[in-house]
Amino acid sequence: MRTSDSRHVWALLSCIPLLGLFAYLAMAISRNTIGSFDSPIIALIQGVEEPWLTKWANFLATIGSGSVVVSLAILLAIALFFGNRREQALFVLVVVIGSGALNQILKIIFQRERPTLHRLAEIGGYSFPSGHAMLAVSLYGVLAYLSWKAIKKSSGRIFVLFLAGVMMVSIGASRIYLGVHYPSDVVAGMSISATWFIISSVFYGAYERKRIKVGQQEAEDPS
């Protein structure tokens, strides 16, 4: 098995524990046994409430909203399209918009009400899974993936992964801090969005390898 194929197999296998985590949280919510998971995390995060943290959390809520994230994804896709990277443009849209659509479907299925205690922001709709968490993983996952392919130095790649991880966790934690999501909403959102991203990136990588291979064959045999 080629190295690239092996990496894709391992990537797909990593979806199993992610889906297992999502299923576990969904089952615990349906059985009303999730309190032991949610309560300590809520107490920890909301226990550090400060005015400046509230402003920062609201800022993260704004830049992590569906309208902003989708707009950024569309702008990135347009830039890639006109930069003669049409496949990457489509990849961005599939991952980000697909994640948003999946979130809406799951919210309709589970219909979990949002927390009502100690809310620092007001928002409607259902709670599970967190849309902000899902979009954060999809957007910053895509940005990290494309940056990884463009950056050759390992230090640059590590920095990009670190920055993407910080943004994902920060946006997810801000939803708990503001009292608009349970921790299980955020963790479930991250896990299912990561699954969607991994599957999408595997298919994109396979298509890219095939396209490069065809191009090489045409170059070797122009007739």
Image (cartoon, helix red, strand yellow):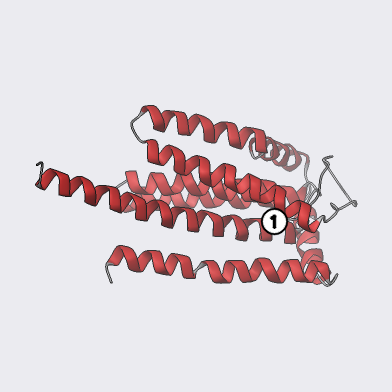
Judge by depth and name the residue closer to the eye, 223 or 149: 223
| Image location (x, y in percent) of residue 21 | 64, 69
> Residue 198 at x, y = what percent?
49, 58
Left or right relative to 31: residue 75: left
Crowdedness near tag 1: few (<14), some (14–19) or many (≥20) residues, C-alpha within 10 Å: many
153 vs 10, left or right, is left
Residue 188 location (% of width, % of height): 68, 60
Q: Residue at x 23, y 52 (%)?
A: 213
At x 23%, y 49%, the residue is 214
Q: Is residue 130 visible?
A: no
Q: Quadrant of the N terminus?
A: bottom left
Number of numbered markers: 1
Depth check: 127 or 87 in front?
87
Residue 145 lies, in percent from the top left, at 42, 49
Amino acid type shown at disc 1: Val
Q: Is residue 211 left or right of residue 144?
A: left
Q: Provide the residue designation for mark 1.
A: 186
Instruction: Name the residue: 71% across, 47% down.
Output: 104
Q: Residue furthest top?
A: 82
Using the image as rendered, state which of residue 200 and residue 50 is in the foreground. 200
Task: Say which quadrant the C terminus sits in.
Answer: top left
Q: Is residue 95 visible?
A: yes
Q: Residue at x 78, y 71 (%)?
A: 28
Q: Secondary structure at mark 1?
A: helix
